């Protein structure tokens, strides 16, 4: 039985989006972290552990939110976790360059009366804007510890962790801020009533939520004491008669008023003499004319870099590893050499070289702050598909993997928009498809043909998105999103995040690649590939103009798209695909792979987000559309 001194400490990281929570989480937990979902929810749950001064510390990264209302799943999750699970300490990460806006959320956290400290992050960005924050003064107003940090450099994070452990051990609860006299009087009266009922939330917080008209809290309290809810409504109406506004707006305005007073008294702002570098970058990258060539240039540069680096690495790994495979003969040796080692070598030599540079570039763009600008620039285009620019972020994520792209569509406000966005992102060629397009068409037909396929893909996505917009009833929403400042990506943070993504890919994809390669080699040794290929030949040979054996690869491609190229190399006994396929066949094969449903994991993500019926419609449509488009492409290319 562990002593109290040795019991694990639980730390929850809470704050707005884009304040550096993930950087601090990664710094604390390193590689000892995992991503899952909250019980019964589709929102990601990031957890990790570390050992500090003989203590085991569990760290949980709460969703980035701006309030503790009940308007979104993320907001409900955060407040339920803090109020009911009661972590030993909450670290509220605050953006020092936007203090007043961030303090609005801090005041709500204080209302939950939990042990708490503030990480005043990005003080370097604040200084660049001429903002100097007097930490002792801020600490005095909030009555909780405040630690200055620069998360991207690791500055102040050890001090932050040390203070968090001390606060957790002291179990000192944060004290809620006090509001105006009239509001405080009503809060006091309702709090006295709440204290008489058995409820797991802090009484004052419940009283505030009842006055605000929070539906979830009203239901909970109403089941215990309906009269209490009625009494709170009367007090809320009293405030509304005095101020002429709904009580929720009155309390929100009071929080902003308090946040403004604290910010004014604890910071000094010296306006810079001219526009900062980030402001100048913003002016260029979001310019209504210049912004679009920059966006197109960035996307083309990403593809060119992935192709160049991936091609070099692929050739290098093939030269190193192929002699190992050649040491094994037929029979059982072929299962080991052609199946087991062939799958492993293909994964390392064909797949990994393209995955690694793509994830590195994607992480760099995320950390720099460019992706929200790209979302802003594409808002008008996205509106033609019935969605808004916010969908561009899962759209770009789709080039890495369609699974997180589908899950990322939950940022859309309505079910209709989520459906259109999820459908659209499944048409985006993920990194596995990039392996096929660049490793096959780019390498053996020409990079200009590979780029043409990506351009065709964008046109088709727009057309199909527009059709979906017309078919599904409803109106598109406007774009409301935060534009974080540009930041210099931190090498350590970028490399760590890239490694986490590549590691997840390796753990998930490589077993499937190796198993698929072994099964395929076993079918080959057993003489079963030809009957399967012949059964599918009306489609593969008659309609698509491909070798009959490619039907087997398209079936296995449902597991993962890169398996199609891996298995092609396994079956043909060579990675020099120019000796076994014509240029037209390579292009047609790439088109079919690019458009039929990405993989079984994507289907699972669609079921999770849209339920099985919509997922089934999307899956069947994309398989049929891929075959249709492939056949049309074969005929057009043959005529050319």
Image (spheres, rainbow, N blue to C red):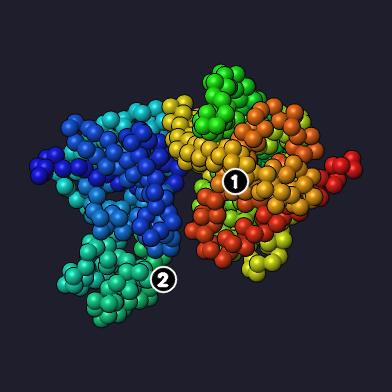
* 426 shown above or below 332: below
The x, y position of residue 77, in whole percent, is: 36, 57
Q: Measuring 31% from the left and 59% from the top, which residue is drawn there?
A: 80
Q: 124 and 214: which one is in front? A: 214
The spot of residue 101 in percent (x, y) is 42, 48
Q: With respect to residue 623, does 95 lie above or below?
A: above
Residue position marked by numbered label 1 in the rendering: 556
Q: Secondary structure at mark 1?
A: helix
Query: Of marks 1 and 2, which one's residue comes earlier in the chain?
Result: 2
Q: In the rendered image, which residue does mark 2 sit on?
A: 246
Q: For this view, does 402 lie left or right of residue 144?
A: right
Does residue 229 sit above or below 70 in this rendering?
below
In this orientation, does residue 388 appear? no
Give the camera-side residue of 202 and 320. Answer: 320
Q: Please give the name of the residue rendered at 64% of the width and 43% of the height, measured from the top-left corner.
A: 529
Q: Secondary structure at mark 2?
A: loop
Seen from this angle, which residue lies furthest right? 639
Q: CA distance from mark 1 to mark 2?
A: 59 Å
């Amino acid at each position: 039985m562990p002593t109290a001194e040795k019991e694990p400490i639980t730390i929850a990281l809470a704050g707005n989006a884009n304040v550096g929570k993930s950087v601090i989480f990664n710094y604390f937990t390193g590689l000892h972290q995992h991503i899952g979902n909250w019980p019964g929810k589709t929102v990601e749950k990031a957890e990790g552990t570390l050992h500090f001064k003989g203590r085991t510390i569990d760290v949980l990264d709460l969703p980035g939110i701006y309030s503790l209302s009940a308007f979104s799943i993320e907001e409900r999750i955060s407040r339920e976790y803090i109020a009911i699970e009661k972590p030993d300490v909450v670290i509220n990460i605050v953006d020092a360059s936007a203090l007043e806006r961030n303090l609005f959320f801090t005041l709500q956290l204080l209302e939950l009366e939990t042990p708490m400290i503030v990480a005043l992050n990005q003080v370097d960005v604040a200084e660049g804007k001429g903002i100097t924050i007097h930490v002792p003064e801020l600490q005095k107003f909030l009555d909780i510890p405040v630690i200055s940090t620069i998360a991207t450099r690791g500055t102040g994070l050890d001090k932050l962790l040390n203070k968090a452990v001390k606060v957790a051990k002291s179990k000192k609860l944060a004290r809620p801020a006090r509001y105006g006299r009239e509001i405080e009087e009503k809060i006091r009266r309702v709090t006295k009533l709440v204290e008489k009922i058995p409820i797991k939330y802090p009484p004052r917080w419940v009283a505030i939520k009842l006055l605000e008209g929070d539906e979830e809290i009203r239901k909970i309290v109403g089941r215990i004491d309906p009269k209490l809810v009625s009494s709170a409504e009367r007090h809320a109406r009293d405030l509304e008669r005095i101020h002429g506004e709904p009580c929720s707006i009155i309390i929100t305005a009071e929080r902003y008023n308090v946040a403004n007073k604290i910010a004014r008294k604890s910071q000094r702002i010296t306006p810079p003499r001219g526009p900062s570098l980030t402001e100048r970058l913003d002016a260029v990258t979001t310019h209504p004319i210049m912004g679009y060539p920059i966006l197109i240039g960035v996307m083309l540069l990403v593809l060119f870099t992935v192709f160049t680096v991936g091609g070099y690495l692929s050739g290098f790994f093939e030269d190193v590893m192929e002699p190992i495979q050649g040491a094994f003969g037929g029979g059982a040796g072929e299962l080991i050499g052609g199946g087991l080692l062939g799958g492993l070598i293909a994964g390392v030599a064909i797949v990994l070289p393209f995955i690694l540079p793509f994830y590195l570039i994607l992480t760099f763009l995320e950390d720099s702050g460019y992706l929200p600008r790209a979302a802003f620039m594409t808002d008008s285009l996205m509106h033609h598909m019935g969605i808004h620019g916010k969908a561009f972020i899962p759209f770009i994520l789709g080039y890495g993997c369609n699974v997180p792209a589908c899950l990322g569509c939950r940022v859309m406000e309505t079910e209709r928009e989520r459906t259109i966005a999820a459908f659209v992102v499944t048409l985006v060629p993920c990194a596995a498809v990039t392996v096929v397009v660049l490793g096959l068409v780019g390498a053996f037909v020409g990079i200009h043909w590979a780029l043409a396929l990506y351009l065709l893909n964008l046109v088709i996505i727009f057309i199909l998105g527009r059709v979906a917009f017309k078919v599904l009833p409803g109106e598109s929403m406007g774009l409301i999103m935060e534009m974080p400042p540009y930041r210099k990506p931190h090498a350590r943070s970028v490399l760590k995040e890239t490694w986490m993504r590549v590691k997840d890919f390796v753990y998930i994809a490589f077993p499937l690649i190796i198993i698929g390669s072994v099964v395929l080699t076993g079918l080959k040794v057993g003489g079963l590939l030809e009957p399967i290929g012949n059964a599918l030949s009306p489609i593969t040979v008659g309609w698509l103009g491909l070798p009959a054996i490619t039907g087997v690869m398209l079936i296995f491609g449902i597991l993962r798209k890169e398996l199609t190229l891996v298995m092609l190399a396994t079956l043909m006994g060579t990675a020099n695909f120019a000796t076994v396929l014509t240029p037209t066949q390579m292009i047609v094969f790439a088109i079919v792979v690019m458009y039929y449903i990405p993989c079984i994991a994507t289907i699972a993500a669609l079921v999770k987000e849209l339920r099985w019926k919509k997922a089934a419609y999307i899956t069947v449509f994309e398989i049929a559309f891929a075959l249709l488009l492939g056949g049309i492409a074969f005929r057009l290319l043959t005529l050319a």
